[in-house]
Amino acid sequence: MTFHRFVRRLHLYLGLFLLPWFLLYGISSVLFSHGRYFEGLYNDGKPNWTVRFDRPYRIEIPASADQRAAGERILRDAGLKGAFGTYRPNGREFHVYVYDFWSATQLKYYADRGRLVAEDRRFRLDHMLTGMHARGGFTQSSFLDDAWAVTVDLACLGMIAWIASGLYMWWKLSQTRAWGALALAGGATHFALFLLVL
């Protein structure tokens, strides 16, 4: 097993192993860019969100409060659990967004009215894929969320290794070196132009 053969095998098997990730990020990027078109596919008159409950609720959340701790308290009081994020659009509202790959629930606390409203989002494939694309990081407290974040990190490192092995193989093939250099320069120039002007 020479180094060159090892790199070729690495490139081949990394490409096959990373295929689901390339598909996920490629398809979901199209959904991000053309979301208005896909909205039309679900324009069937059914609401994206349905109210699960709307009930009296009171909690003090000062402006300086730890929003994650406040979100955990609201989730506990609502009887929900899972990965979540918080959002405070203004001084009167506090939102907690609970999600997994298949479903999502948003809790809206209205401090001025003393109400907590929970809404469930209906399943949509485009939301699932864009949610998978955007999900990552180590802010959640569960083992599975950390495992997903580690897997995303490994997939990204795998993509870098796949690119590096591709560059190595291109350089070793002298008969395609000129065309490869042209393709590499074209891609880099194209990317740099957008980086400068946008």
Image (tube, helix red, strand yellow):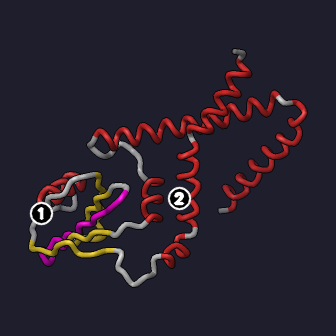
**Where does the image place residue 50, in percent across and percent down from the top left?**
27, 75
**Where does the image place residue 180, in percent across and percent down from the top left?**
83, 40
At horizontal 25% and vertical 52% (from top left) the residue drawn is 82
Indicate left or right for 61 with 155 as reference.
Answer: left
Is residue 136 shown above or below 151?
below
At horizontal 45% and vertical 76% (from top left) the residue drawn is 42
At horizontal 28% and vertical 71% (from top left) the residue drawn is 90
At horizontal 21% and vertical 69% (from top left) the residue drawn is 118
**111 inside magenta stretch:** yes
| Mark 2–mark 1 distance (CA, rounded to whole Å) | 39 Å
Q: Which residues are magenta?
A: 102-117
Asked whether 167 or 4 is in front, the reply is 4
* Residue bearing mark 1: 60
- Tag 2–tag 1 contact (CB < 8 Å): no
Asked whether 198 or 110 is in front, the reply is 110
**194 inside magenta stretch:** no
What number is the disc on residue 28?
2
Instruction: Report the residue that reaches farthest toward the bottom.
Output: 45
Indicate left or right for 137 with 140 as reference.
Answer: right
Is residue 92 shown above or below 66?
below
**Where does the image place residue 11, in percent across and percent down from the top left?**
66, 32
**Where does the image place residue 92, in percent across and percent down from the top left?**
21, 73
Displayed quadrant of residue 64: bottom left
Image quarter in which the N terminus is found: top right
Residue 111 visible, this angle: no
Indicate left or right for 86 with 134 as reference.
Answer: left
Tag 2 secondary structure = helix
Label 2 vs label 1, nearer the camera: 2
Tag 1 secondary structure = loop
Q: Amino acid at mark 1?
A: Glu
Q: Amino acid at mark 2?
A: Ser
